[in-house]
């Protein structure tokens, strides 16, 4: 069934490329992913099953789930509703559904009653967030499938106005699809969706996740690896949920693959308690795809301290050069203060002034005239972090220790907007041993892996940072003293120190 549907879809793709020169194939679910999604579902134990495919395309997800329902041997009737309004897909969808109907009857003696709703799925479900099969009474479904389209919509768009209580500002169409799909679930029904990884942790989607996970329980999560350095995830993952409130003993099963989801390249992890997978208060989902990640997550959650415990805060650099060009100078002069820029971060330390390697002269604009008080900060010990690391950096947190004694002639300095800095909220400052220990821990491979689990966006915001775990001050100073004694600050040496002092290591 699935193979037949994919063959018909490929014909449409080839015809569209030839006639319209449009790469239509990237919009359709791959065969392996569709079969994987169908396999993640817990099939209803009943003879008649109601299925909704929201944004059905050519029916690839429907075919995969129908095939599995038929092979289960317990289902005798399937009522399928496909919502699709793309004129290119509709003829192929209807043809595929007719073929599926005949195959169900001939091979499995299963009755398939398929209906196509040729409307915008979000707008069709706007009335009380429900979808009606016959336009006269609400219809709820045992299984809801969706691989929603992505498009950024304005807050005043008709689709966004359908669910104004879940979003603010611009919203991606895929999340509106998900909201409407969830409202079509029957009690105990299941939703299977292919979603952007941003759904798992994005702060802007906190309100939606709180709504979702107050009445739906995540059951299975599948992530796709790219196979590149540090095993980053692809931009989508598969999530299945059951329409019921979470219970204290609920668990989540993770799986991962380096391809579209073939069984021979899929790794299944042991079930994890939902309380470990979902963080509060944002209800973020931690997407794990490796036993090492499970180990690191458990270890970090046992640490006794945090940034907030030590009174540490993360802030963004004060000076945006494009806005204050008239205040920037190339040479030091009376009344000017140093401007620490991202190029100053090198091998764990802050260099000032930064010398260009080719010309061996200082980079321009490294001094600023503090005509605006908000461009100044006290010159004291801090830890700098690049806001947007380069791909060549390797680690998510690219840090550097700055000691106030490096610039003894200045009581005030300024920082570039593309840097974050960690400072104390009190009048005191971090001592060098504590600061170097903090650097070693944040730079280490275990912490890098932990940060990658927490955030898929590439950045950690200030709100998330305050809750990140840290070891005791004695442990931090012990690691810092090791680095200061040998004057080695590379990430590899930080890994060695953290592994020896804290007895945790991760291979990158």
Image: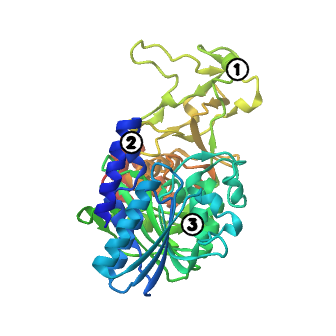
Pick the residue in front: 247 or 172: 172
Query: Which is closer to the viewer, label 1 or label 2?
Result: 2
175 is higher (above) or lower (below) than 218 = above
Classify mark 1: helix, strand or loop.
loop
Disc 2 designates what residue? 16
354 is higher (above) or lower (below) than 501 = above
Q: Residue at x 46, y 35 (%)?
A: 349
Using the numbered discs, state the Cα–Cα distance from disc 3 to disc 1 in whole angstroms.
Answer: 56 Å
| Residue 181 disc label | 3
Using the numbered discs, state the Cα–Cα distance from disc 3 to disc 2 in whole angstroms.
Answer: 29 Å
Disc 1 designates what residue? 369
Mark 1 or mark 2: whose residue is earlier in sequence: 2
Image quarter of residue 366: top right
Pick the residue in front: 151 or 476: 151
Q: Residues within 10 Å of mark 2 (few under 14, many from 20)?
A: some
Query: Which is closer to the viewer, label 3 or label 2?
Result: 2
Mark 3 or mark 2: whose residue is earlier in sequence: 2
Coordinates of residue 406 in the picture (x, y in percent): 54, 30
Q: Residues within 10 Å of mark 3 (few under 14, many from 20)?
A: many
Quadrant showing the N terminus: bottom left
Image quarter of residue 412: top right
Q: Residue at x 35, y 53 (%)?
A: 9
How many dots with numbers? Answer: 3
Classify mark 2: helix, strand or loop.
helix
């Amino acid at each position: 069934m699935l193979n037949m549907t994919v063959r018909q879809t490929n014909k449409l793709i080839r015809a569209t490329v030839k006639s319209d020169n449009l790469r239509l194939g990237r919009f359709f679910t791959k065969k392996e992913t569709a079969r994987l999604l169908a396999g993640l579902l817990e099939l209803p134990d009943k003879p008649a099953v109601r299925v909704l495919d929201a944004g059905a395309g050519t029916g690839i997800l429907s075919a995969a789930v129908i095939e599995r329902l038929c092979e289960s041997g317990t289902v005798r009737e399937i009522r399928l509703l496909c919502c699709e309004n793309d004129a290119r897909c509709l003829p192929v969808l209807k043809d595929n559904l007719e073929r599926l109907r005949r195959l169900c009857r001939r091979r499995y003696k299963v009755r398939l009653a398929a209906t196509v709703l040729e409307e915008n799925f979000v707008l069709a479900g706007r009335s009380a967030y429900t979808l009606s099969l016959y336009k006269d009474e609400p219809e709820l479904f045992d299984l809801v499938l969706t691989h929603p389209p992505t498009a950024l919509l304005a807050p005043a768009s008709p689709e966004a106005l359908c669910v104004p209580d879940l979003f603010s500002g611009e919203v991606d169409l895929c999340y509106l699809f998900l909201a409407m799909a969830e409202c079509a679930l029957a009690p105990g029904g299941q939703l299977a969706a292919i979603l952007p990884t941003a759904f798992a942790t994005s702060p802007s989607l906190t309100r939606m996740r709180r709504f979702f996970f107050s009445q739906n329980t995540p059951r299975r999560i599948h992530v796709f690896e790219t196979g590149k350095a540090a095993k980053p995830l692809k931009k989508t993952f598969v999530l299945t949920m059951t329409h019921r409130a979470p219970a204290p003993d609920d668990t989540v099963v993770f799986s991962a693959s380096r391809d579209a989801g073939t069984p021979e390249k899929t790794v299944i992890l042991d079930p994890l308690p939902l309380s470990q997978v979902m963080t509060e208060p944002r209800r973020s989902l931690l997407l794990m795809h490796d036993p090492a990640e499970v180990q690191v997550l458990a270890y970090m959650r046992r640490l006794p301290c945090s940034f907030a415990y030590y009174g540490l805060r993360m802030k963004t650099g004060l000076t945006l050069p494009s806005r204050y060009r008239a205040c920037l100078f190339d040479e030091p002069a009376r009344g000017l203060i140093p401007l620490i820029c991202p190029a100053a971060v090198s091998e764990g330390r802050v260099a000032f002034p930064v010398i260009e390697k080719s010309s061996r002269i200082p980079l321009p604009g490294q001094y600023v005239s503090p005509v605006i008080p908000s461009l100044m900060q006290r010159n004291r010990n801090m830890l700098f972090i690049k806001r947007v690391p380069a791909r060549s950096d390797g680690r998510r947190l690219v840090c550097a220790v700055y000691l106030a004694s490096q610039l003894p002639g200045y009581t005030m300095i300024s920082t570039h907007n593309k840097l974050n800095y960690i400072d104390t909220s009190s009048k005191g400052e971090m001592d060098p041993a504590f600061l170097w220990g903090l650097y070693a821990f944040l730079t280490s491979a275990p912490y890098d892996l932990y940060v990658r689990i927490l955030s898929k966006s590439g950045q950690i915001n200030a709100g998330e940072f305050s809750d990140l775990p840290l070891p005791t001050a004695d442990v931090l100073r012990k690691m810092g003293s090791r680095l200061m004694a040998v004057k080695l600050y590379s990430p590899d040496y930080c890994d060695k120190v953290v592994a020896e002092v804290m007895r945790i290591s991760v291979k990158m």
